[in-house]
Amino acid sequence: MRRPLPFVDVPGLVLSVLLFIFFVPHAVAQYPMPKLPAVSGERAFPTGDGERSLILHAEPLGVAGLGEPAVRWSSKLARFTPRDHGLPEVAAIKAAKLASKQDSYDPEATEQFGLLKVTEPTIGANFEANWSVAQTPPDNSMAISNGGIIVTANNDEVLYMNTSGNLLQFYGWQDFFSNPNLNANIYDPKVVYDSQADRFIMTVLHGSTASNSIVLLCFSQTNNPLTGGWHVYGLQGNILNNNTWFDYPSIGISNSDVFVSGNLFSSGANQFNQAIIFQVGKAQGYAGQNLNYLYWSNLTASPFPAFTLQPATWGQQGNYGPGMLLISNNSGGGSVMRVWEITNNVSSNPVINSYNTTVPNYSPAANANQQGTSVLLDNGDCRVMNAFYLDGKVHYTHSTDIGGGWNGVRYGRVNVSNLQTTTANLGNQGGSDLSYPAVASFGSVPSDQDVMIAFLRSSPGVFPEVRVVNCDQNMQWSNGVLVKAGETYSSFLQQNNVARWGDYTGIARKHNASSPRVWLAACYGANVPGNQNNTYKTWVAEVGGVSQVGMDELPAGRDMRVYPNPVMDRFQLQFTLAETTALRVELLDVQGALVKLLHEDTRRPGEYLFSFNRAALSSGTYQLILRGNNSIIGHATIIVQ
């Protein structure tokens, strides 16, 4: 049973409602749709590179997620062979790489991070959230409002929390909808915050056959779902009436519309059929009125079929439009990305255009090992994980084999004016797998291309964990920062010695923070006492950053664990020495000046735990340096509060 809800401050809730009442949508900056290169040649359809439906209408199904459930059933039927979102040809590529990958494992291999010239991620508030006790993979998604309300969802449940980690409300999916007509499995949540309207939008899927597949689309009635609930609509998953069901949703918002894309699979045989996009007017959804919507189908298949199209929402405060940019690739690998342009809003005869951009080769990696078990983790494929658009560029992430069958992060920026793409890979060939990346803007203004990327990590010597990394304007990587260490391996509902992982990681920018702040929600290996062992929990964390400009450039060091971070009363530093070392532990300020020589002595090989009291330090950010035999052997950023 989940922990009880804490006391909720009612006056605070009243304030949230008042903030919503006096919200002025026109005060939020809106941005124009960018101009892409002119399209030439004959088109597949009068509506461009896809077929546009007539405008359709959907009535509201009711209100969900409002108040305390009369009875918390939390019902969920878990299949011992979880649904596979992938394609059989991708599975074959991954399997062929596994044996040689496992033979190449090197426990001394480290991530190929850059020098400390870029923003170093720092972890602020962080806390436990959703559990995975009924279904796998977790499928983490999260959004945060300007008022600090967090909606974090996985395949088991949806939670409302605040930035202090207080649990305000939670629902299993059947309890959330409380609709007698929604009795099939409910899964694959995606939630976003619309900073223009100060509301949340969430999509969740129902059923996995042609007869019961429904795309549930939910619009929060206020800026705090705890006080208002959600208007709910149901779009038919078998919208083409071709015996298919809708899988793996992606969601994005423009000035006027919400876009939900997904993949259709044949009912029963579960063979990929095609990708489709729903385009929905959002104003009616917020008001609880009948929706106007259309859908795009029969998307062109050159140089490969459309699959998992990711809408690219504006990356900072506000939206753009009319229309939407989307991006997709070949889940089985290749050297091309496809950029999609929907040119107008739902009621203004939009056209869809497809463009190709050449990139360095990408391909699927073999599945991942984990500590303490022979059960592998499913690394997924190369599909685009998420994307955003900002100041003329589409930013995106996906996984790729970075060498020898090891999974790494591919981050790319597409200049939409000339379709030129720059990319950077992050990886740890021979050491660990980095999977399910999610990217968010970390820039101060739209022209600042700085991003934070959250990802999952595992290896034969590491339980499944959560990390974050920064990539700056010049595509330089920071050091990766541990967000939450895994506590055990995952074998929940494993089949054929493979457990599901991911399938995606949640990330969201808090748009009105005084300095850039990103929040993430991701899974790590954990036990849930009394419920399920060797499964996943969700960790939610706030990510800030400290510029390292002005400090000596430091080489990437051995992995060190500093905790707690931010520091309250004491902090502890755990590290390992491989040989007898003349050791110095130094504390520097953000300008690189020595604040305190904390330790100086010769130490024998072994694992060490160093700690000190923060009472002598004022609040701020510091750099902790380990020097061994006159060379820097490790470093970490710490925050004192």
Image: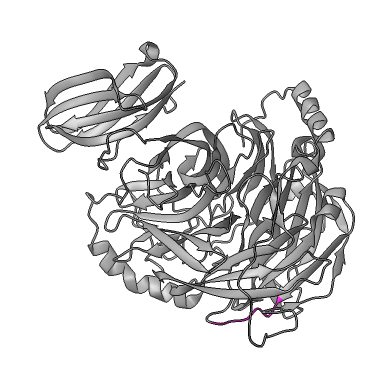
- Please determine whether, in this image, residue 578 is positioned above or below residue 565: below
Q: Quadrant of residue 378?
A: bottom left
> Which span is picked out in magenta?
297-302
Q: In this view, does 151 lie above or below 323?
A: above
Image coordinates of residue 283 in percent, x first then y, are: 83, 53
Residue 298 lies in magenta, yes or no? yes
Colour logic: one colour
Front-most of residues 619 and 153: 619
Q: In this view, does 35 lie to the left or right of 366?
A: right
Q: Can residue 411 be seen in this view?
A: yes
Q: What residue do we see at 75% from left, 67% from top?
A: 212
Q: Which residue is drawn at 69% across and 47% down?
A: 318
Q: Is residue 457 above or below residue 633?
A: below
**Residue at (52% x, 43% y) in the render:** 442
Left or right of residue 429: residue 601 = left
Q: Is residue 331 left or right of residue 197?
A: left
Q: Nearer the viewer, residue 67 or 256?
A: 256
In the rendering, at what x and y percent does residue 589 appear?
A: 35, 24
Closer to us: 139 or 628 = 628
Quarter of the view holding residue 588: top left
Residue 1, percent from left and from top: 62, 37
In percent of the image, x 74 and y 79: which residue is there? 47
- Magenta segment, principal secondary structure? loop
Check residue 201 for magenta coloring. Answer: no
In this rendered view, identify the residue nearer to me: 613 or 588.
588
Compared to residue 286, the image places residue 499 above or below, namely below
- Could you tell me residue 103's position as x and y percent? 23, 63
Horizontal relation, residue 341 to residue 541: left or right: right
